[in-house]
Image (spheres, coloured by chain):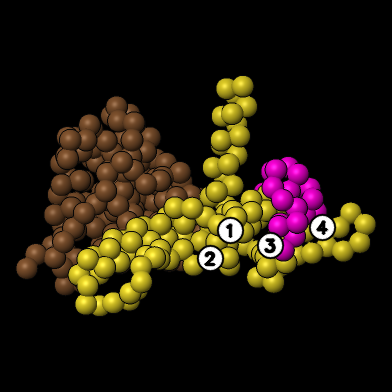
Chain colours: A yellow, B brown
Amino acid sequence: MKLNKASLFALIAVLELAGDTAKQLSTTDIAQKHGISAHHLAKIMRNLTHAGLVQAVRGAGGGYRFSGNVRRTTLLDVIQLFETLESELDIPHWGSDGDPIIVELQSITSEIDNLTKAVLDTITLATALKNTRIRAELMTNSA
Amino acid sequence: MKEQISIRDAMASDLDAVITLDQWAPMEEKPTYWSEVFDHYVRRNKTDRFFLVAESGNIVVGFIIGEVRAWEFGSPPCGWVFALAVSPESRQLGIGQKMFEEISKRLKQTGVTTVRTMVDRDDKLTLSFFRSLGLCTGKYLELEKQID
């Protein structure tokens, strides 16, 4: 599975902001911290704002802060703002019901899609943040 | 003030409370099913089977059942949690987490280092709950088919 850049950057930004809901960060702050394109991230932040996951704070020291629900929002909720996660078979007669090979391949990709969604739709931001903190502690302790 | 939650071993007298909490088994099959579960996990008093209940003010508000299973499908001994319920009125209080932590502690005391469970992939609430406790997809995949 390969997430598109928009989904990946959105997850990074949302997790960064949701880690401290009082924190306000600019697009540049987030981009620099995680080594991603600030230009690309700016567009993504507008989508996240529109979806109600982040809120733009105006004025000096402004930026974005998290405005969603960390215990209710899942990784899939964020990803689906940018892509559908449906596998596509790049074949000329897509949707042909008469070809058993294509139907079998559709069945396999559908099984994979369902498993992927079952994982991403049950990891809330709160859970991902908790695991992130545990990883950070382990990395600090082993350094 | 919130009642203190305590976790204890289930007793035979908890049968009715557990039947009430169970939301899965069909109503007509519950008495037989739970009577057999109590026989197996409460009355026989084995050291590798655990049936715990959560109590709030002398009222049973949740239960969890697990056991050590060894060499199923080639797996070394590991803990299995195969039933967990919390009354709808007592959710969001950390009772499920408390019960899971207690049963994990008991399982660990038997020598196992892994705990497993199985959840309907459409049951987002329960899956999210176990995820929040650190469980993730394990090395075994459940496979099934309709038998013609």
Instruction: Give the labeled residue for mark 3.
Output: A44
Question: Residue at 71% across / 57% down in the picture?
Answer: A41
Mark 2 or 4, nearer chain start: 4
Magenta run includes residue A41: yes
Mark 4 or 3, nearer chain start: 3
Instruction: Give the image location of residue A85, x and y in percent.
Output: 46, 63
Instruction: Give the image location of residue A56, x and y in percent.
Output: 79, 64
Kindly identify the amino acid type of the residue bearing the numbered disc 1. Ser
Give the letter of the chain under mark 4: A
Instruction: Give the image location of residue B93, x and y in percent.
Output: 51, 56
Instruction: Give the labeled residue for mark 1.
Output: A7
Q: Distance of mark 1 from mark 4, alpha carbons?
A: 20 Å
Q: Distance of mark 3 from mark 1, alpha carbons?
A: 9 Å
What secondary structure is marked by label 3? helix
Q: Distance of mark 4 from mark 3, alpha carbons?
A: 14 Å
From the viewer's side, name the closer residue of A119 and B106: A119
Q: Which mark, residue A83?
A: 2
